[in-house]
Image (spheres, grey):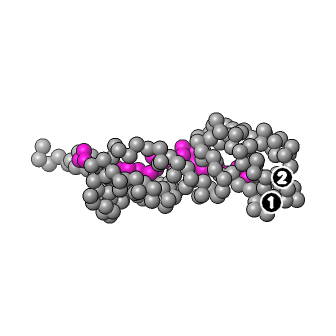
Amino acid sequence: MEGEIRNRVAENESLVVFDLEDYFPPVGVKTLDLSPLAANGIIRESEARDFISRLNPDEYADAVVAVQLDADTIIPQWIWPMAAAQLAEDALYIGAGSEADVLSQYYAQRLSRLDWSAFAHKKVLLKGCGQYPVPPSAYVQAAMHLRLSAQKLMYGEACSNVPIYRG
């Protein structure tokens, strides 16, 4: 058909869109604040065990969990694995720190596990401008991996992109 509108981007088999939002946690990032355990700046094991045992793992299902504790507290190192062990079966990822830091940790781990050879000799568009707060470090990690396999790397949208690398 002469007047038919065609989506040439979709028809272009050598152009692959890599969207970091595809890896965004389904229910986002949730915070587990352990600060209520710090009476007078000290965490007691018995109180910590009780607090952590009462956590409902279902509340953290499929979430990236940022475990946080006030820096003015004497922090025993066993608190981190104790909290992680309670949520490990349900949470998508668990890390210590701010939500932004833990989301960056999650993306670093997630992207390191991908098979990047699928992008070999392809033109790859690293999609930008999404609805989720994908951390800048995720774009750095993705670009690093894609640079090693892709024929060409671009950032943006198919209709408007910035060339990043051409092999």
Element class at badge 1:
loop
Quadrant where the C terminus lies?
A: bottom left
Amino acid type of the residue tagged 1 in the rendering: Thr
Is 155 placed above or below 106 here? Answer: below
Horizontal side of residue 53 vs 26, given as left or right: right
Decide which of 123, 157 is in the foreground and name it.
123
The residue under label 2 is 43
Residue 101 in sight = yes
Kindly tell me whether residue 127 is visible in this rendering. no
Q: x and y percent of residue 109 in the render?
A: 52, 48
Q: Quick one: 125 or 81, which is closer to the camera?
A: 81
Q: Residues within 10 Å of mark 2 (few under 14, many from 20)?
A: some
Residue drawn at point x = 50 percent, y = 46 percent: 110
Residue at horizontal 31 percent and vertical 61 percent from the top: 165
Q: What is the three-letter code of the residue carrying label 2?
A: Ile
From the image, tell me which residue sits under label 1: 73
- Element assignment for label 2: strand
Q: Residue at x 77, y 42 (%)?
A: 52
Q: Which residues are magenta?
A: 12-33
Magenta region includes residue 140: no
